[in-house]
Image (cartoon, coloured by chain):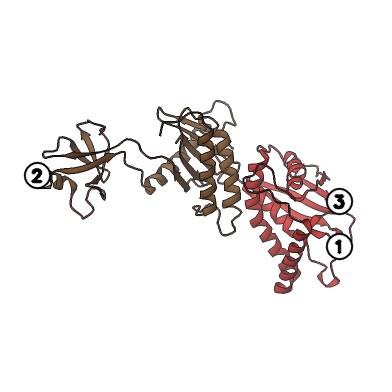
Amino acid sequence: MSRQSNRTTDSKKMNAELFTLTYGALVTQLCKDYENDEEVNKQLDKMGYNIGVRLIEDFLARSSVGRCQDFRETADVIAKVAFKMYLGITPSVTNWSPAGDEFSLIMESNPLVDFVELPDNHSSLVYSNLLCGVLRGALEMVQMAVDVKFSQDTLRGDNVTEIRMKFIKRIEENLPAGDE
Amino acid sequence: MAIFSVYVVNKAGGLIYQYDNYVPRAEAEKTFSYPLDLVLKIHDEKVVVSFGQRDGIRVGHALLSINGVDVNGKFTADGKEIIEYLKDSTNYPVSIRFGRARLSSNEKLMLASMFHSLFAIGSQLSPEVGSTGIEMLETDIFKLHCFQTLTGIKFIVLADPRQSGIDALLRKIYEIYSDFALKNPFYSLEMPIRCELFDQNLKGALEIADKASNFGPGS
């Protein structure tokens, strides 16, 4: 992962494996601390949420993307710009619901789970749940309430990793002026 | 100093950061003898000149210091009422400094929330739907530029009217905010920004913008 070249901080390339190791250490420590997969999933989601509310500003500052007018545009921006910028992968957007309020992001590879195998006693652990929290937090800061969950996971035997995102509503409180 | 100040306002309209980059040039210190030929009055807890403009001392200037010691509102540093002090001929000759009173932080907070409300008027007055809020406010001394992010944070820069490149500066300040304020895990969102690195980098960005400007008030 490299940083943009127009930054005032020095441009650092960090080893992606260090990132994978860090995330793995985080999840295993949470498992030891909570000993309950559901609780760990919740904590990962909360942590992801805190990352998301901050990451969105970094994303907006660097990508100069304007406000998305509908959910399809949002899906495209998430898949083609955001995932590319932060994880270096471009998931595909598919399985739109008839009402256009739900879609799937299909990832062939997930950088968080390189080298990971889930043991049998953690079968209900959603290892990459942090990503769901990040997406939820980031979209909430731009006034969209969404529900994000993993519907397929390579760690649990599926072929691909699939994140299902559902639009719940636009958050009307505290809308920035000029966006009604 | 072509960039005068930077204000950052959160979603709710509260001021979370403020930086002043100017030195009021119009300050005058003079020695006076009894009787004082300026007419002073109390306004907003400060002593201001109401009549008798001369020698760089303008109407509206506040009394900043007496004999080199800064005053405290309408009292001197040792607690005497200024108006009474200046009526006493034994205190003369006295050296008084007048200048434009700086805004106190409470006043700045109030003005920032007022601006937050006015900002919305820009989009409400618009004949077409989808207008942004107020982006620029111009007076003959300065231009105020405002940039609102999609998340509702406003970055406001007061600059010399002839200064160009403020849009790029606003985007740069947004980047600095997303880096040094948000990536600091100990900074809570929407709270006043008290991050050293943010201050340093902001000053650096303002210096670069100043140098890049071809002109500015002579220093």
- Where residue A176 sits in the image (x, y, percent)? 56, 41
Chain under disc 2: B
- Chain A: its colour in the image is red
* Residue A101: quarter of image: top right
Q: Quadrant of the N terminus of chain B?
A: top left
Q: Is residue B196 left or right of residue A112?
A: left
Disc 3 secondary structure class: loop
The residue that label 2 is drawn on is B89
Which residue type carries mark 2? Ser
Q: Is residue B42 left or right of residue B122?
A: left
Asked if badges 1 and 2 are on one and the same chain, I answer no
Disc 2 secondary structure class: helix
The residue that label 1 is drawn on is A156
The residue that label 3 is drawn on is A108
Q: How many marks?
A: 3
Dot 2 crowding, Cα within 10 Å, few <14, some 14–19, many 20+: few
Residue at far left of view: B89
Is residue A172 visible in this depiction of the protein? no
- Where residue B32 sits in the image (x, y, percent)? 16, 39
